[in-house]
Image (cartoon, rainbow, N blue to C red):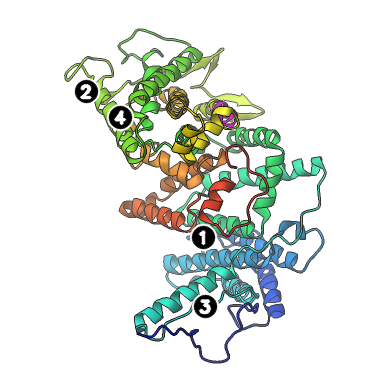
């Protein structure tokens, strides 16, 4: 068999390797103008009526007032136009695109196109044909298509094709060409190198940038959690996903991350102030309910991040520690279903719940943490199931009457701290907040405590030992680190934080039952979803599990219209995300380099690798 290789032939004149060209054969200067002009025209189209009837959700019949999905298309068009203008080197806008604007233009235009055409198709399907479209719908479809064609005409460096064996079969030639075409597509939206370091901003300007970023984050979260119908939530996911990707490709996210890392205390305080403002943006307690459950989920995920993200211990039964804290608090908080006639104040029940969870963590960890990898995962999975079955059987029939079996500990009373009744409505700053808003603010305080503990632990001597154990336990022990001791500390600390969150969960849910603490279930938190939140968000970081938990709770809750296909669609989305971004949404720099070896190495790595 011959070993001669040749480059694949193509019809027409071959394009020299490394020559910047676009995917579409339009001159680059015309393509840039089309993308920018299409973005501006997309903005104008959202102020026109898209349909003649209000039967389509969002009422897109008004002129001069965008509503529903039109707002999302407006955002997509604005981002396309903004990045397009920045690509012309307009002073003041170049700060937004340190890595170049071309890839950001493509993703922003693609997001606007997808949202606009999804809306047009949804209107035609729901109302019975394109005849139900008004001129604004046609203008939006044409404008976003124009912007998309212009964006993909922008030049980029094409990768060189791999050699091909002429004796290969037709199927192998097809696979080779497909791989090469995919590499060209990836190169067309690749992040460019940072052209020049940013001009140093004054401290007050950097703080204003942080405030603006937090305000945008609060707005996006509030809008997403408040989407009232299915079409709007799908459009929100499209716009938010492509908008985030466009900002990342432009280098804007990296620039903001560098500023927040420089002012870590200001960022942390600002983030919690922005989160505390959430209940005051709501007219009722409806979405505060989702908010408080997201915080419980996120806090427990952050505790698991110590075990998995920092120490590298795969724990598949972590939700049991949440249950230990919840059952402990429910039994000593005056519930009529409790076998103990106790009604301790919250601060004491919280300490007791955290302490009992820590004891369970030490009891489980001491004999098992000498195991590694899959063996440790199997043991922790067994502990989670043992806990659930134990509280299920201690019902007075199969065992002692302690947990009331499958009925659980019910009628857990609302908290009353210093005369503040968490079950009643209160007026704050002229806004009436209800029961779940009260617990949201309390849970936010618990989350702040967990964040501080995580941050201080990661930056400490023990935190560096955790990272060393995670990277190579044998090498760490050879350097004098007591691997068993530091792993046991991580296990106990993670259990303590989960138990602390559980003490609040008991009062929020009124009832604590064994079914709430399974390994896998449709409704989080459970061990599978907690681990997914850590991996999805980014292991070893603070913001990663918080964002991952919010997405994993919010998206299934909003995808209920899919019925039996809800978990299937959710699973497919997770598989795709892990395939194309395995390091997570907000990874630390060291983990990102593990998956992307060709990325630019960092100048400085923190103690935790961030």
Labels 1 and 2: the sequence-earlier one: 1
How far across and down, in percent of the image, does residue 547 sit? 53, 43
Toward the bottom, the furthest residue is 12
Q: Give the Cα separation between the discs numbered 4 and 2.
A: 15 Å
Residue ID for mark 4:
383
Labels 4 and 2: the sequence-earlier one: 4
How far across and down, in percent of the image, does residue 445 sit? 57, 26
How far across and down, in percent of the image, does residue 37 sit? 70, 72
Please, is residue 524 above or below residue 113 in the view? above
Circle 4 packing at 10 Å, graded few (<14), some (14-19), many (20+), is: some
Toward the left, the furthest residue is 397
Question: Residue at point 35% right, 7% down?
Answer: 341
Q: Which residues are magenta?
A: 447-457
Tag 1's secondary structure?
loop
Please, is residue 426 above or below residue 564 in the view? above
Q: Give the Cα separation between the discs numbered 1 and 2.
A: 55 Å
Q: Give the Cα separation between the discs numbered 1 and 4.
A: 55 Å
């Amino acid at each position: 068999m011959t070993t001669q290789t040749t480059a694949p032939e193509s019809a027409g004149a071959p394009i020299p390797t490394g020559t910047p060209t676009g995917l579409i054969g339009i001159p680059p200067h015309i393509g840039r103008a089309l993308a920018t002009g299409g973005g501006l025209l997309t903005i104008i189209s959202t102020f026109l009526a898209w349909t003649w009837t209000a039967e389509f959700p969002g009422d897109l019949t008004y002129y001069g007032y965008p509503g529903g999905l039109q707002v999302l298309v407006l955002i997509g068009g604005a981002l396309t136009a903004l990045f397009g203008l920045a690509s012309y080197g307009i002073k003041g806008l170049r700060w937004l695109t340190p890595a170049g604007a071309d890839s950001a233009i493509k993703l922003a235009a693609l997001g606007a196109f997808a949202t606009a055409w999804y809306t047009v198709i949804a209107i035609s399907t729901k109302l019975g044909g394109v005849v139900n479209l008004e001129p604004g719908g046609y203008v939006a479809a044409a404008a976003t298509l124009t912007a998309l064609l212009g964006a993909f005409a922008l030049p980029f460096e094409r990768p060189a094709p791999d050699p091909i064996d002429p004796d290969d079969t037709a199927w192998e030639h097809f696979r080779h060409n497909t791989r090469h075409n995919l590499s060209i597509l990836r190169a067309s939206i690749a992040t460019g190198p940072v052209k020049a370091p940013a001009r140093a901003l004054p401290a007050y300007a950097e703080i204003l940038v942080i405030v603006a970023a937090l305000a945008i984050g609060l707005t996006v979260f509030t809008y997403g959690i408040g989407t009232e119908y299915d079409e709007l939530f799908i459009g929100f996911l499209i716009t938010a996903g492509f908008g985030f990707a466009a900002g990342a490709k432009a280098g804007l996210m990296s620039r903001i991350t560098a500023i927040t890392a420089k002012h870590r205390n200001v960022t942390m305080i600002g983030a919690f102030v922005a989160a505390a403002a959430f209940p005051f943006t709501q007219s009722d307690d409806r979405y505060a309910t989702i908010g408080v459950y997201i915080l419980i989920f996120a806090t427990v995920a952050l505790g698991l991040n110590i075990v998995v993200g920092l120490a590298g211990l795969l724990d598949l039964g972590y939700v049991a520690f949440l249950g230990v804290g919840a059952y402990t608090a429910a039994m000593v908080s005056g519930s009529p279903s409790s076998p103990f006639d106790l009604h301790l104040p919250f601060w004491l029940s919280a300490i007791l719940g955290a302490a009992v969870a820590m004891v369970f963590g030490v009891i489980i960890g001491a004999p098992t943490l000498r195991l590694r990898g899959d063996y440790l995962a199997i043991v922790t999975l067994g502990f989670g199931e043992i806990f659930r079955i134990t509280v299920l059987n201690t019902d007075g029939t199969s065992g002692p009457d302690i947990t009331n079996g499958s009925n659980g500990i019910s009628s857990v009373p609302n908290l009353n701290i210093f005369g503040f009744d968490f079950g009643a409505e209160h007026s704050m700053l002229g806004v009436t907040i209800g029961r779940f808003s009260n617990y949201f603010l309390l849970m936010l305080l618990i989350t702040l405590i967990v964040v501080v503990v995580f941050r201080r632990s990661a930056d400490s001597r023990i935190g560096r030992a955790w990272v060393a154990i995670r990277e190579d336990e044998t090498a760490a022990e050879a350097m004098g680190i007591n691997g068993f001791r530091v792993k046991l500390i991580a296990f106990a600390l993670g259990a303590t934080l989960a138990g602390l969150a559980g003490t609040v969960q008991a009062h929020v849910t009124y009832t604590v039952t064994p079914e709430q603490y399974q390994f896998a279930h449709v409704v989080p938190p459970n061990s599978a979803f907690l681990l997914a939140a850590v991996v999805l968000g980014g292991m070893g970081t603070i913001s990663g599990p918080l964002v991952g938990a919010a997405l994993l709770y919010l998206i299934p809750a909003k995808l209920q219209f899919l019925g039996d296909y809800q978990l299937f669609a959710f699973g497919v989305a997770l598989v795709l995300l892990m395939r194309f971004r395995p390091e997570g949404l907000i990874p630390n720099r060291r983990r990102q380099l593990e998956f992307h070896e060709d990325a630019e190495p960092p100048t400085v790595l923190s103690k935790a690798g961030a």
